[in-house]
């Protein structure tokens, strides 16, 4: 799927790949885990509780960090 997307939209395909990859990594660190090889029952578990304090802190931290990067990009382009 990524390769089809890459050929039709090469300028934004890397963003989608990084976003999908980080989403899977985020699911891997939760206690519910992730079944990477779906038909098999093997599941990789993490240490974070979904909806817990650590997850809320990480969400806030990365949200502020994203805003910082967006503003940095905007002001570097127009200055």
Image (tube, rainbow, N blue to C red):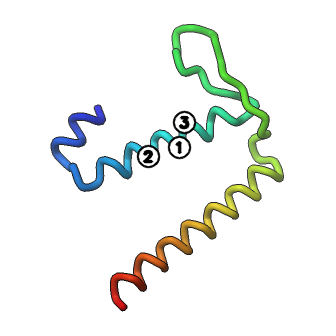
Residue 33: percent from the left, percent from the top?
68, 27
Q: Earlier in the sequence, mark 3 or mark 2?
A: 2
Q: Where does label 1 land, which residue?
A: 22
For label 2, count other residues whose C-alpha is less than 10 Å away and answer few (under 14), some (14-19) or many (20+): few
Query: Distance between the Cα atoms at labels 3 and 1?
Result: 5 Å
For label 1, count other residues whose C-alpha is less than 10 Å away and answer few (under 14), some (14-19) or many (20+): few
Q: Where does label 3 land, which residue?
A: 24
Identify the residue at horizontal 37%, vertical 52% (top origin): 15
Count every numbered label the image shows and give the total.
Answer: 3
Residue 18, numbered circle: 2
- Residue furthest right in the image: 53
Identify the residue at horizontal 62%, vertical 41% (top origin): 26
Residue 10: percent from the left, percent from the top?
21, 49
Query: Distance between the Cα atoms at labels 3 and 2?
Result: 10 Å
Given contact means CB atoms under 8 Å apart, are the residues at marks 1 and 2 in contact? yes
- Residue furthest top in the image: 40
| 17 relative to 3 in the view: left or right | right
For label 3, count other residues whose C-alpha is less than 10 Å away and answer few (under 14), some (14-19) or many (20+): some
Q: Quadrant of the C terminus?
A: bottom left
Given contact means CB atoms under 8 Å apart, are the residues at marks 3 and 2 in contact? no
The secondary element bearing badge 1 is classed as: helix
Q: Up-down: is 27 above or below 57?
A: above
The secondary element bearing badge 3 is classed as: helix
Identify the residue at horizontal 62%, vertical 26% (top origin): 34
The secondary element bearing badge 2 is classed as: helix
| 74 relative to 68 in the view: left or right | left
Residue 69: percent from the left, percent from the top?
51, 71
- Frontmost of labels 3 and 2 is 2
Query: Distance between the Cα atoms at labels 1 and 2?
Result: 6 Å
Identify the residue at horizontal 55%, vertical 72% (top origin): 67
């Amino acid at each position: 799927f990524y390769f089809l997307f890459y050929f039709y939209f090469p300028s934004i395909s890397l963003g989608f790949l990084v976003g999908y990859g980080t989403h899977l990594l985020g699911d891997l660190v939760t206690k519910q885990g992730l079944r990477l090889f779906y038909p098999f029952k093997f599941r990789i578990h993490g240490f974070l509780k979904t909806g817990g304090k650590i997850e809320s802190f990480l969400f806030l931290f990365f949200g502020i960090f994203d805003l910082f990067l967006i503003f940095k990009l905007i002001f570097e382009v127009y200055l």
